[in-house]
Image (tube, rainbow, N blue to C red):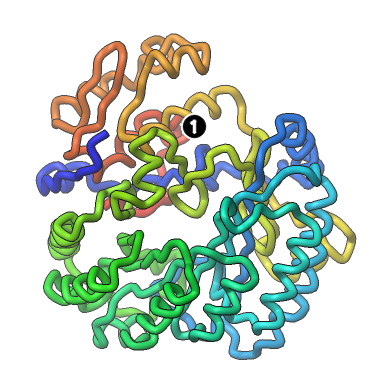
Amino acid sequence: MEQTVTFDLDLIKRYDKAGPRYTSYPTAVEFAEKFTADSYKQQIALSNQRGGPLSLYFHLPFCDTVCFYCACNKIITKNRKHAEPYLANLHKEISLQAALFDSNRIVEQLHWGGGTPTFLSHQQMRELMAVTRQHFNLADDATGEYSIEIDPREADAETIALLREIGFNRISLGVQDFNPIVQKAVNRIQSEAETFAVIDAARANDFRSISIDLIYGLPHQTPDSFAETLDKIIAVSPERLSVFNYAHMPERFKVQRQMNSEDMPRPEVKLEILHRTIEQLTAAGYVYIGMDHFAKPDDELAIAQRENKLYRNFQGYSTHSECDIVGLGVTSIGSVGDSYSQNQRTLEDYAVSLSNNELPVFRGITLNEDDKIRRTVITRLICHFSLDINVIENLLGINFAEYFADVYPQLNQFATDGLVTYDQDKIEVLPAGHLLIRNICMAFDFYLQQKTEQRFSKVI
């Protein structure tokens, strides 16, 4: 496949509307409380029947300070003792969940997200990983993919060495922007020195992959100022970058009201930042994976995409499509059997469930056959920018043209606009359509077609 992207301003303006990021299909807005802990247990039984490896996601929600742009589920506190009762409950959930999964199933993937996972003390991090190993069957370091999100303000060389010692081999660093004016506006003061010290420590401790997170669309950003940040990041040569489009939705996220809307870059400025970013990263040798993600050509993500083995889940792009994902911790989302589920959303409700020895399932969805068909189509498009219709028909037992007859008028428009080419055998997303892949996937989204109100961010 062609891992390139074409920036067409007229097309982007025409297609710039709200839409899902498709970390799942159906998306989380379709989850319902009628999906209970008993529903989840039924899906675990189905998952055990099918077998295969597991992926564990741990949500560690605590942060020392709030970043004004953040839309994550987090708890802001400077009191480190607040983590103690939460960790006791998390240990209990690990035990309850692990007891339901076949013990011979290997955990190939593990991720600590947040929040700021390194909010925890070194001893707490050791204990959490030890409890995990006690209850789940973790793969060895050579085959396991164990990653953690790092705030460089909350980690030093000693912390990075500890993380490697307890089993992590990949890190993702939040940077967002090095410009001091932008940092002050978003309440995230983070020096280049402390950021690069973490990267140096990760390399010294033989971490296999370093990923950097940046955000465009923040207050006071300009194409030139963001290009300066990007040059500094390119110079330290991370294996992967995520360059996220900031979605300013203060009506939904109160903390975003701390920023002045008048300081936000205008839409045309945001697009120019994106355009420059694509040019800089491409010139530096990175390939466009999709949905804000870039990687070096020899990175596992880029290789998996070229080999049509890439997958997408709640953490973004992944190379482990065969894994069922077990969500652990408050608000965490998992994908087990033919279902998605989310844990309780408050510390109180999470604690009550576990005090009653109950799985802390808050809501979820069991996929029907139509969901699974559309998920397969959307996942392949968003990961590989192409769809082999013959393979889909054989795999899913459908007549593609008949099943998706209502989609063809939109495909015709996409083709007219130069986003795709298609015939009876294949749909191919062209480089001009790579940035607009969410729009193309939306054409196959049954639930989206039924809605008049959108609860998603803009696609660009």
For this rendering, which residue is in front, 19 or 236?
236
Name the residue: 49% across, 86% down.
Answer: 156
Q: Residues within 10 Å of mark 1 (few under 14, many from 20)?
A: many
Q: Is residue 353 left or right of residue 419?
A: right
Name the residue: 47% across, 47% down.
Answer: 318
**Where's residue 165, x and y in %?**
62, 73
| Tag 1: amino acid | Arg
**Where's residue 113, x and y in %?**
55, 65
Name the residue: 17% across, 46% down.
Answer: 12
Q: Is residue 98 left or right of residue 340?
A: right
Quarter of the image where the N terminus is located: top left
For this rendering, which residue is in front, 430 or 27?
430
**Where's residue 269, x and y in %?**
14, 65
Query: Is residue 387 shown above or below 256?
Result: above
Residue placed under numbered mark 1 in the picture: 375
**Where's residue 264, x and y in %?**
23, 72
Residue 130 placement: quadrant: bottom right
Q: Is residue 225 left or right of residue 331?
A: left
For this rendering, which residue is in front, 185 or 101?
101
**Does residue 147 appear in this view?**
yes
**Does residue 189 appear in this view?**
no
Residue 62 placement: quadrant: bottom right
Callout 1 secondary element: helix
Residue 30 placement: quadrant: top right
Q: How many marks?
A: 1
Name the residue: 76% across, 36% down.
Answer: 48
Query: Is residue 378 shown above or below 41?
Result: above
* Residue at the extreme right of the image, as rendered: 356
For this rendering, which residue is in front, 349 or 380?
380
